[in-house]
Amino acid sequence: MAPLKLYGMPLSPNVVRVATVLNEKGLDFEIIPVDLTTGAHKQPDFLALNPFGQIPALVDGDEVLYESRAINRYIATKYASSGAALLPATPSAKLEVWLEVESHHFYPNASPLVFQLVFRPLFGGAPDPVVVDKHAHELAKVLDVYEAHLAQNKYLAGDQFTLADANHASYLLYLTKTPKAGLVNDRPHVKAWWEDIAARPAFQKTAAALPLPPPPSA
Amino acid sequence: MKLYGATVSWNVTRCVVALEEAGAEYQIVPIDFATAEHKSPDHLARNPFGQVPAFQDGDLHLWESRAICMYVARKHKPDLLREGNLKESAMVDVWLEVEANQYTAALNPILYQCLVSPMFGGTTDQKVVEENLEKLKKVLEVYEARLAKHKYLAGDFLSLADLNHVSVTLCLLATPHASLFDPYPHVKAWWDGLMARPSVQKVAALMKPSA
């Protein structure tokens, strides 16, 4: 089977969201670079894959998909019998709730935080403290809900690691590398959940592949 | 089935569309924002984020409108999801995400500025409206190209992806930007087709969105 093609920038957390699931499934894939800094994502070649001009896009044989969460569900469904089972045999309404919670509560706050604290400095800029404070404040409230939930549930959908947990991994990874890591680490159940995800061999493979610059020396 | 929330909320009525299309038996239990009922312990037990909608079917308690819609579709009208057909369900999933992350992401701030802010004695920030109208028009260009090739968003079959657009689009009609679809004939035809559905007519009557 030809490797799947994941289009995007290797450091982009939405691309890493998909890489996380590809690795959980033990699938062979290559990242085809789409350089946002040169506007490659708005060129006809890429728009033919994702008409909304955003990364990632995934090509699996004849199938062309975009929207990282839709891509992830497709991978989890098509390759259900490979690697870790990310979707239960019987659909779970609770899983659907937490997939949505990631998308509409966690991500809208984690994403701007990671952009300001990780990516602006990488491109030579400085974090905007107003944006950082606003989203740190909101994410704290969101993670309080996660803390209460994870006190009763090992993983978001219950006893098993699922797509709902996997979809958080890339932003959790970046967040815990920033000065706002306390949002995760100060909440014991959220911290334990994150550490469990981080210890998964497939996720360690995903994290190791990220071309991150070394941290600044103290 | 119980759906908790007020029909002025387009997230609540997103679920009403799904419930109507699925032919499910349900009741709407109003939640009164004026008395902060959404932050009451009873409601926080239904939705820990203190938002509407929340949903109950027997012992099952759910929140997040799109998770509720998916549950309702799976239970009563799985044809709207096409699970079991990988190619079709993949397209449904892509366009479910597009509704949330491209279409409604741009439309929400417009609806908030034009409909919600004035309801609370605030003003309409035209700059926010203009910025998001520009984003939405770019999104509609993609929809136009898609709907020129397919009758519905996921393909030539109606799916939950189309239906999840209805509640916010009904609200758009109550703003000064109701004719936004006019330059996009295939989008307009798609919308007119959805509007003709009895379920959508019923929800439109229920919402009676006020400007």
Image (cartoon, coloured by chain):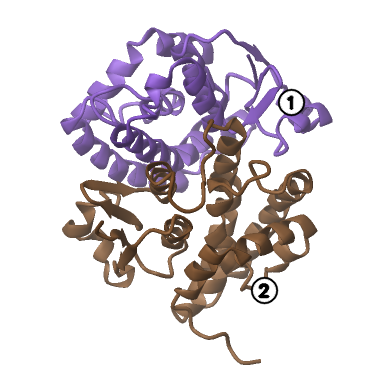
Chain colours: A brown, B purple
**Can you say which quadrant of the picture contains the N terminus of chain A?**
bottom left
SS assignment at label 2: loop
Q: In this view, does A84 lie to the left or right of A155?
A: left
How many marks the image carries: the answer is 2
**Residue that protrudes farthest toward the right in the picture:** B41
Residue density around tag 1, few if under 14, some if 14–19, many if 20 or more, within 10 Å = few
Amino acid beneath label 1: Ala
**Res B47 label:** none
Mark 1 against mark 2, which lies toward the viewer? 2
Residue denoted by label 1: B34
> Are the residues flagged by discs 1 and 2 from a single subunit?
no
Up-down: is A55 above or below B98? below
Q: In this view, does A159 lie to the left or right of B135?
A: right
- Residue A179 badge: 2
| Chain letter of disc 2 in the image | A
- Direction bottom: furthest residue: A217
Residue B211 seen in this snapshot: no
- The Cα–Cα distance between marks 1 and 2, rounded to whole angstroms, is 38 Å
How far across and how far down the image is residue B200, in percent?
41, 14
Q: Which residue is drawn at 58% across and 31% down?
A: A93
Task: Residue A175: give x, y in percent of width and height.
Answer: 61, 66
